[in-house]
Image (cartoon, rainbow, N blue to C red):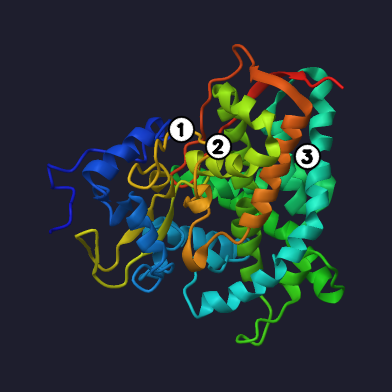
Amino acid sequence: MATKTENDTAAPQINLFDPQVQQCPYEAYKTLRDEAPIYRIPGTPMFVVSRYDDVREVLMDPVRFRSTAMDQSTRNSPIDVERGNKITQRFSEKGWVPAPALAARDDPNHKQMRAMFNQAFKPSKIKEIDPQVEGLAYQLIDEFVGDGHCDWVKQFCIPLPLFIIGEQMGAKRQDMWRIKGWTDAFFHRISMMLPEDRHMEMIDREIEAQHYFQPIFERLRKNPDDSLISVLVNTVIEEWGRPLNDNELHAEMMADTFVGGSETTTNALAAGMKLLIENKDIWQQLKSDPDRYMKTFVEEVVRLESPVQSLMRFTHEDVELAGETIPAGSVINVRYAAANRDERQFECPEKIDLERPKAGSHMGFGSGVHHCLGAPLARRELTWGFTAVVDRFEDMWFADGKNDFTYHPHFLLRSLKELHIEFEPKKG
């Protein structure tokens, strides 16, 4: 079967770059799954993969579907080589050119680097952090529970994962909101939604972050401690005969620690609260037996709203997928969020089901060799975040007239801008 192209009149007209589509993309995803599961975005070398089984096939075959582009000049801007070159030049002139992050590497290089990260994020390390997560979740809620209202995103969803990962990355608590500005810059610059001038502005803000963290790297090389960032700075990757260099560290700080380790959890915490308010039967069920239902609730939030909507893979040779031919040099947009609502895999996929069997089989954390490194920490943060909600709130609702429920324009991630809620504190 020939691949669908921009000239194929049978292909649906779906524009995933349209900010209005991004506000609620799930009908578009259903159309793609049903009518064009391997869909070429007109005018680009990008193919969107939307069905669960096809997404899984891509993720489980890192040889045919690679994390490195065939032409490395596309790395900074997958469909705009000229802009990508300008980005590299700006980093080179003012800061450090970020090396490919862990998720953008192929084996054996990826496997060698991942082994070091596995050491930094090993289960015993996450277990050590767990009391901090629990304590911070309750502390944050207790700071505003007496007010009866809050901006849930700003006052809870952002600081919980940001403060946890920030402390592990050697940052001072008083600098956290400044760091949030830098992570926002990275978030927007990878959105694929910015005009060039705004894009370069985000690069400049990210370079500010590089100059903040560089002295931390240098201090930890002289005086290592037991933090995660010290492990990343000082652990020698055996096959390389060295630890990460500055360019590699700066890439990891933004991509895999601050944005991967906080932004995505922030968005899941916001999504979960919105879902609880919209589905009061689920709220009552969760409250009735949190020990029984909390784990599944967390998985359902990640599945339903998929904070990471999609990421990229690349073909270095012609490949076949679902009967379609995808040519060498293509960009594969792996739509986790579409796979997570695939009726072929999940019964009533648009609904939360706290009795759902194999609730953790979603693609919200990816799969295969690139499965999300921070998934165990994210699950702990989500679990403690919503456990604190159950323990502190009798009920909650949207603040009247204060929400428009808009999401940041973004091709890859799903991020609610703000969520104003009111609540009745639990008595006793």
Q: Label 3's element? A: helix
Q: Which residue position holds label 1?
A: 351
Residue 292 image point, x, y percent: 65, 40
Residue situated in front as seen by the camera: 312 or 80? 312
Q: Nearer the viewer, mark 3 or mark 2?
A: 2
Numbered disc 1: secondary structure: loop
Q: Nearer the viewer, mark 2 or mark 1?
A: 2
Quarter location, residue 296: top right
Q: Amino acid at mark 1?
A: Lys
Q: Are marks 3 and 2 in contact (CB under 8 Å)?
A: no
List x then y, in percent, for residue 158.
Answer: 69, 39
How far is disc 3 from disc 1 in space, using C-alphas? 27 Å
Distance of mark 2 from mark 1, alpha carbons? 10 Å
Residue drawn 72% across the image and 34% down it: 156
The x, y position of residue 240, in whole percent, is 61, 85
Tag shown at residue 90: none
Amino acid tagged 2: Leu
